[in-house]
Every structure is written in C-alpha cells, then in structure tokens.
Amino acid sequence: MFAGTLTRNTETAQYSGMIHSSRFDIAIQLENRPKMSERSPDYDVTAVNKSGRKVRIGTAWNETGNTSGNPYISIQIDIGLGPFRVNAVQTIEARAAKSGEFEIIPMVSNGFMKSGSISGELTAMDADNAFAGYIANMMFDLDFMLIENDYKSEDTHPDYRVEVSSPRGKPIRVGSAWMAKSSRTGNDYLSLLINTPDGDLRVNAVQNEEQRGGKTFSIIPFIDGGEQPQDAGAGLSLVA
C-alpha cells in the first residue's frame, strides 16, 4: 500500500520525491551509482533519518515495460519494516509533455490472501459518485474511499480506484473496484481488489434485503461463482 511522486532533475539526471503509506511519509532521493554489471542498480535510494543523517534505504533500476515499451523505474526500499517494491511510472499526459514527473505505485501482486473472517461496510456518498467505507479483520483495519476512475476507457477497466490516507493525509491507491451485476439474482454489487498488509484481498460489497435501495453495502468475502469482472486480477495496475 504505497503511493508517491518522483521528479527528475534534468541537470543531474537524478530524482527526488516522496513516498507514502498508511504508516509513513518519507522524502527520498535517487542518486546515480556506478554499475558493476548489467543488472546492477542504477541508483541508490537515500533519505534523511530523525537525526538528520543521510542514509541509504534501497536501490533502483531503469526499466522498460515488456508490453508498452514505456520506461519506468523499479525501486526496492527497506526502512526497517521489511523490504518492499514499488514502480515509478508516467501517465500518458506526462509522457506526451516529456515531463520529468513520475507517479509511484505498488507493484501488482499475483498472490492472494484467503478472505477468512472479514467485516466491512461501504456507503455511497451524496456527491462525486464516490463511496466511503472500512474493511477489517483481527490483523488490520482500513478506512478507505472509492474514487471514480477518470481513466476508464474500456469495459474491463476498473470503475473506481480504492484509496486510503497516509499519516499526513496523502491519498494512496491500494486497489480497484468494479460495478457488477449478479447473473443469478440480477442485483447490482461492487467487486473490490484491495492490497492489504497481508496480501491482495478480493471482496464483494453487496446489499441484503434490508439494505436494498439504500446507500449502504456490506462487505463480504469473495466466493468464486464465475461472476468476477473479467480483468479483476489487474487490481493495482493503472490505466494510463
């Protein structure tokens, strides 16, 4: 569950930015480093600790997308909570403008956690076609928002992005959601893919008889009944 921005310094070919999670907000620098081999990192990732000392917290590589051919930066960081990976990518608009602005997004995971005992609720907001809700079990408790996906251009693209807030209030994308309709009952529901601290989690937001016609949905574990939206496994990938 990570978000952030990265900006290229055209004079030094280095980068600076911020990375956010629900637990921290950290200013980072990507500094050029000598390459010992083709797969050696291109950059050291550094940050300033509480004592004001600059420390190395990870490494980064220049990469090219296999399908898109677009350049991006793969970053591995460890700040004492265990290593994690993120990518710094550019939107279509940033590439067209030849901008040095990148967006930090979590790497798409192929690993899913078992839903187990999940509680949660989702409520339609009065404006902006958005939803607010929470999802929790004994290991985590997340408040989140569903924000309409302005980049949706195909039926299989997510209808919403799932966002939480960092300690400083920065929005962090942690998943995607699709509007769906049950082939058995004809009732509308939302299918969510969320990256939790324990792995990727699929759940559905449905309305029971008492809730139907209102604004509130109950979040329940996903049961594979063949009704999952076609590209639900694409969860955290950005449509850009």
Image (cartoon, rainbow, N blue to C red):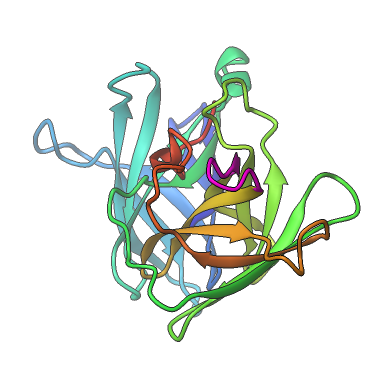
Residue under the point 48% across and 80% down: 137
Q: Front-most of 20 and 193?
A: 193
Residue 122 placement, left or right of 95: right
Residue under the point 61% across and 59% down: 205
Q: Residue 14 occupies which quadrant of the picture? A: top left
The C terminus appears in which quarter of the rendering?
A: top right
Count of marks, rendered view: 0
Query: Extreme left residue here?
Result: 37
Assess whether residue 182 is covered by the magenta stretch. yes
Tell me: residue 210, above or below residue 140: above
Query: Extreme right residue here?
Result: 126
Query: Extreme top residue here?
Result: 96
Q: Front-most of 43 and 189?
A: 189
Tell me: residue 48, above or below residue 194: below
Q: Where is residue 229 drawn, in percent x and y?
A: 48, 38
Looking at the rendering, the stretch of residues picked out in magenta corresponds to 178-187
Query: Extreme front residue here?
Result: 184
Q: Where is residue 10 drawn, in percent x and y?
A: 52, 26
The answer to whether residue 142 shows anywhere in this view is: no
Residue under the point 41% across and 38% down: 234
Q: Where is residue 94 drawn, in percent x and y?
A: 60, 23
Q: Front-most of 61 and 115?
A: 115
Residue 150 placement, left or right of 7: right
Q: Front-most of 209 and 24?
A: 209
The answer to whether residue 66 shows anywhere in this view is: yes
Q: Where is residue 29 drawn, in percent x and y?
A: 45, 50
Assess whether residue 146 is covered by the magenta stretch. no
| Main secondary structure along the magenta-highlighted residues | loop
